Every structure is written in C-alpha cells, then in structure tokens.
Image (cartoon, coloured by chain):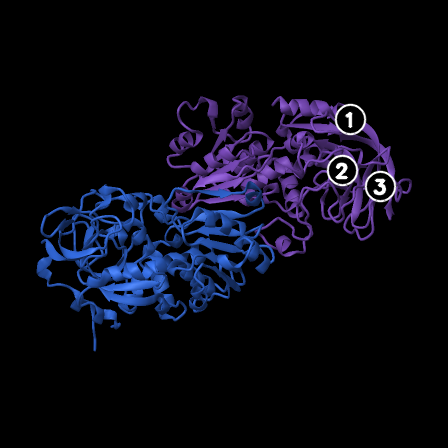
Amino acid sequence: MNGNSSTAGKPIRCKAAICRKAGDRLVIEEVIVAPPSRHELRIKIICTALCQSDVIFSKLVDPPAIYPRILGHEAIGVVESIGEDVTGVKPGDTVIPTFMSDCGDCADCHSEKSNLCSTLPFNITPYMPREDKTRFTDLNGNPLYHLFYISSFSEYTVVDKNYFVKIDPSFPPDRACLLSCGVATGVGAAWRTAEVEPGTTVAVFGLGTIGLAAAEGARLCGAKRIIGVDVNPDKFEMGKKFGLTDFVNPKTCGDKSVSEVILEMTNGGADYCFECVGMASLVEEAFACCRHGWGKTVVLGVDKPGTPLKFSSTDVLRGHKILTGALYGGLKAKRDVPILCKRYLDKELQLDEFVTHSVKFEEINKAFDLLEEGKSLRCVIWMDK
Amino acid sequence: MEKNTQEATPPTTTAGKIIRCKAAICRNPGEALVVEEIEVEPPKAWEVRLKILCTSLCHSDVTFWNMKPRELFPRILGHEAVGVVESVGEKVEGWREGERALPVFAADCEDCRDCRSAKSNICASFGRRGMVGLGMLRDGTSRFRDGSTGEVLHHFLGVSSFSEYTVVDVVNLVKIGVDIPVDKACLLSCGVSTGVGAAWKAAEVEEGSTVAIFGLGAVGLAVAEGARMRGASKIIGVDLNADKFELGKQFGLTDFINPTTIGDKRVSEVIKEMTHGGADYCFECIGLASLMAEAFSSSREGWGKTVIVGIEMHGAPLVVSPYEIIRGRSICGTYFGGLKPKTHISLLVKKYLDKELNLDPFITHEVGLKDINRAFELLAEGQSLRCLIWMDGCKQLTVPA
C-alpha cells in the first residue's frame, strides 16, 4: 500500500452527496471510503460535472437503479493512494476516472475497431468491476452503491486501475473532467465512430452536451454542413459556436417529418446522422434522412426502458446505409484523451464553451435544477480545497 | 472445335427491325409461365438488344411472380442471364454486335456521384427507377408485344431474360469475356455476385473471422464461398433444410444450425456459444425481418457487423435493441453485394478462371425454355440452387473459345 502517509491504508471519512431514493434530491453526508484494494486507486476529487445519465439514475425506479447510491462519473482528481498490483500511476498524480475499462491487452483493446474492453466488460452494476462489493459505507455501516464504477459526487472515491487516464496537472481541471464522459463521447462519435470526412454533411439530433460535442467533432473533422435538430430554438445560437450551420425544430416542421425536411435540405440525405437523445422515434428519423449508398447513422443515446428501434426493412436493404452505435463515442481512453487534451491546448478543440455554470459541492442540487430546466450544458461542481 | 461469339449472333439483317421470337410470359400472379411468340422492338437511344443464351431462376423472380397487383402483368420475368449483343441503339458507345454481355439489374452509369464513389454502388441516376419500372429505364415504355394480340408485355428489373431476345439499357449491361463458360458467367449476373460481394465488398470479411449465414440458398452459399475466399476461420450456416450442410461444405461451411433441432434455445444463443460471444459478421440471405433481427443479435459486440442481403417483401419492420446497437454493433443492407457491376464482375471472372472462386456446384439443374416452369418447381421444393434455362440452340456455347 502506497500513498500519502497519513491516510494510506486507512478508511477515509469525508463528505459525499448521496441519492437515497428514486426522485430524491441528493443529501450531503459523511461517509467512509475504504482504502483501495488490490488493482485499485483512491482519488481525491478536484471537481466533477453533472451529466444527464446521473439525472436519469437519480430518478429511475427499476434496475439497474439501486439506492442509496453515490452518483457522478465525469470528474478529475488527484491520486491519494494505490493498492497492490497498480503500476503506471502514483500518489500525487492527476487522473480522470473513466467508465470504460482500457486494459490495453485483450482482443478488443488491441483492435482498432472496438473500444469495448473484454477483460472488464461495461455493465451497469452497483459495485466495483472485479468484485461485487462497494468501497463506500454511510455512518451506520450501510453500503452506498457505485455508479458506472466511478461515483465522483464524493470528496474521495475508489476506482479500478483499468479505469483512469493520467492528466497533466497544469491542464485546467474543469476542462479535463469533461473528457471523462459527455464531450468526449460526442467528439469521439464524429471522430472515431463515424470518421466524418471533410466536406460532408452531418445531422445531429438532440443538442445537449453530447449533441453539441458531436457537432464540434464534425467541425474538427472538416464537415461542411452541420444541421442541428432540437425542440429548443435557443440551441441554434449556442450551437453556432460548435459549427452548426443549419437548424431544424421538429415543432415547427408543419406537416412534414424532421427526416423529410432534412432530406429536402440536403437533396437526398446527410452523410452522417447522430442521435444524441436516446429516443427510439428519433433514431428512426435519423436513419430515414441518412443518405443512401454510404450514409452512417450513429446511435449514442439509449431510451430508459430500451424501447426497440424499428426500421423499414426496405430502407435498410435498398439504402445500403450503415446503422451503428457506440459507448463513449468509440474512444479508447488511454489513447484518445491525451489527443483531445492536446487539441484543446492547440486551440482547435473547444471545451470552455461547454462549461456554462459552476457551483460548490454543497450546492450540487442546483446543478440538477439547471440541467433539468434546460439552462445548462455542463455545470462543474467544485469540491472544497 | 473453335466456337466464337460470332456464331451466336443472328444475321445482321435483323438490326433496326422487330424480331419475333419465343418468350416465357407470366400473365397472372403465381400462374405457370406460357412459352409463346412475342415481338421485340429494336433498341432506342442508349439501349441494346440482346440475344439471350441462357438464364437462371433466382428467388427474386419467384417473389415478383407471386405479387398481386394486376398492373404488373403480363410480364417477362428473369434477370440472371448471359447474352450476345444483336444490335445497339443510338448513342451507345463501346458495344458491338456479337459481343458477349451480362444484363444486370443493378444500374451502373459510371457517371453520377455514387457511381464515381468507391463507397457506393447505388447508382443515383438510375438505381431506383430500374427496380420498380415496368418499361425501359429512360422513357418507361415497353419493347415487348404479345406476338398475336399486340398487347404490351411489361419488363422486369431492367432485364427480362425469360425471352430469346430482350432490350436493356446500356447502364444495365456488363461486358463478359469468352474465356469463362457461358453457364458460369450467367451466375454472375445476380445471385452469386450478390453473395460473394456481400462477404467481400459489403462486409469486407477478414482472414480468421467468424461468419454466420442465415439462409443457404444460392445467395447464402455464395456468401459462404466469398467468406471462404477471404479466409474466414469459421462459417456457420443456418437453414431449416439439413441437406444444406453437406452441400454447403463445398463452399466452406464449417458448422451448421437447424433452428428446429436446438430445443428452447434461440439461434443467436447457439451462435454466441459457438463463437464465444458472437460472430464477427452475420448475413441474412432470406428476407425475413425476424431473422434479420436474430442475425443482428448473433453478432459480436465491439465490431460485429450484420449485412442484410435478403429483401423483406411483407413490409415487416426490422427491430433491433438499442442496447445491442450501442455496444458497437452495426447493420447495413446491401444491394448486389455492394459491387459495381461494370468494375467488379470482371474481378470475379478472373477469380473463377484462377480457380479461386467455385462456381460449378451452384448449377444443379438445366432445362430448355419450354420446361421453364420445372425450374420454379425445383426451387419451390428446395431441390435446386441454380437451374439453368437454355434458349434453343444455345447450349453448345458452354465450351469456351
């Protein structure tokens, strides 16, 4: 066991924001964070950001929801201590935790085509990846469950050694944390999954952080035309910063469907379509207005009950277009996060514009309000010094 | 004995005139075809009149044979064939009387954005029209008339090969050399090209991959053949007909699943067990939305690709789980196996001549034009892969020059 000599090897008592019941606001309580086991590291969180998935898991009643749970999965922190068999990182290093394992060694990690590490497959569980246990307990000794193996709404958390990327400590933390989920997912979808080519036309359905990040990714790839689709007209102005050239509001299409409007605008369909909401009917619309021949539709969002997606078999067959999806935008964290960091420092990738609000840890519920009211993209939650 | 294509051509005096010849006409949906005399007009601008040497029955002919709408009949079906140019219309360049050609339903104008792109084979200028039209591609009118009543007979998929002579647009015509026997060449005008292309071009099956094929008709077995050529390590065939396993081994099949003999399990579960998580590539070669979904579920997460080759004719939607899609699986349809006819068919011919591509075992039966209905029976009974239908006097041309 290796770490800060005063806390290494011992449980840490600290503050965490707990969701005790579906639909409840988070409550900040003292919790006990166990020392990292073998293959694990304990991290002191610097800041964390709220993602729509956290909101969903604060309200969901059925499994994989489970309570009480420590939410949060977009974050950055400093390593406080490491367990046995952890190499390549030491106490004091700055890291962002990731929800996708990157072991670097299995067939998937070796393949260019997959980012789904098969050593530790992604599953939504309440526990650590290698064993069905949690590292958090409340002051009554009851377990507090993990989210996506991260649980960053806590001053300290424990993550598995396959689930982090080192970050240069001089890199702004409230920009780095965005790369552990939302923004990276959107940019990755355009860059790695779709491999958007210069001069092409892109349609993005849903202009939350992921959608705007997909637009940003398409812009970086040289797309000529980026059409945003959203029921909130304010998103057009916001989206222009990220390369949006056109906007379609499904509520003002009259008799036409969104896909019909886009088919007309693009004279036959967009080269790439991204669905960034997780609504079956939108995925179907996205596919319908994707160009035949070479068009690619990428699904990034999933409906809460997993509503099946339905497509016209004729459109699938005759259109010759590809329908695919990705987790974390198809990115391999260890390879791609450093590239995205560099592109930000080179002033190519825009990250600043995604951070619309900042709050202190005690005000974490305000972040939830802002997101639900559609007022924010990313609200960063700062832990106390 | 030297045979060359010149012997196959009619006397040049037919150019510019109506030709009277035999054709198998479908007058009503699902009815036996009747072999009668018809009139074939000369080719107009951009068109070529072809003397058909032989044609073969493809399941798509059967599908359209059974379609209800009255307006589709009377019709001359058939779209997999090989012929010889009898005469060309105005504006046609690069084609001469006597040249051997494959009529292909997949248009290839070589000029539009799609035809110029390596990524698409769906001709934007003519692709859609050809699939649904009842007449010629550009003016929509028919070149066929009933020989006694003068009634218009409709075209089919831009080919209409169940006739001693047909007229096709130049975008539906592919040159074929004389070194490949006529009967093998015929297979490349649809089914086998579609299947091999699906594995090669649409899926890009890699060496060592695992492949699962739903439906082992000629197209499914051609997919197996294509996967075998690409070095797939495991090719699993799925079919209700257990005889297809033995037949399929010639084309590289390594494993077989009969859905009726796996008890409570789903086919996708069995495939996942056999491949430790799912096949790298799955193909649906029947045209049933439920099987397309099953094929998709049989693919491996991370990179699994499902290629839909079969045409769903009952409007049933393809239903997939978003949880499966988001885990990196992809699905796409393919049309003529993703091949550009005028570019890729010659590559398949070369592979056949180099003995890399196996075509011979696809031909299981042969009949003359007068017995064309036997071909339908054999296919319906699951007895045949490809039954060739020879036009009168053409069979001696199977011997290559």
Q: How many marks?
A: 3
- Determine which of the numbered discs, if any, sits on residue A34 in the image: 3
Residue A135 position within the rendered picture, expressed as x and y whole percent measured from the top left: 81, 41
Kindly indicate whether the residues beneath marks 1 and 3 are on one polypeptide chain.
yes
Q: Which chain is blue?
A: B
> What's the CA distance linking mark 2 and mark 3?
13 Å
Q: What element carries label 3?
A: loop
Q: Which chain carries label 1?
A: A
> What's the CA distance linking mark 1 and mark 3?
20 Å
- Do the residues bearing badges 1 and 3 touch, measured as CB atoms within 8 Å? no
At horizontal 42% and vertical 55% (from top left) the residue drawn is B198
Q: Which of marks 2 and 1 is nearer the N terminus?
A: 1
Quick check: can you spot residue A31? yes
What amino acid does circle 2 point to?
A: Tyr
Kindly indicate whether the residues beneath marks 2 and 1 are on one polypeptide chain.
yes
Q: Is mark 2 on a helix, strand or loop?
A: loop
Residue indicated by mark 1: A27
Residue indicated by mark 2: A145
Q: Which of marks 2 and 3 is nearer the N terminus?
A: 3
Q: Which chain carries label 2?
A: A
Between residues B16 and A282, which one lies in front from this camera angle?
A282
Q: Which chain is purple?
A: A
Q: Mark 3 lies on which chain?
A: A
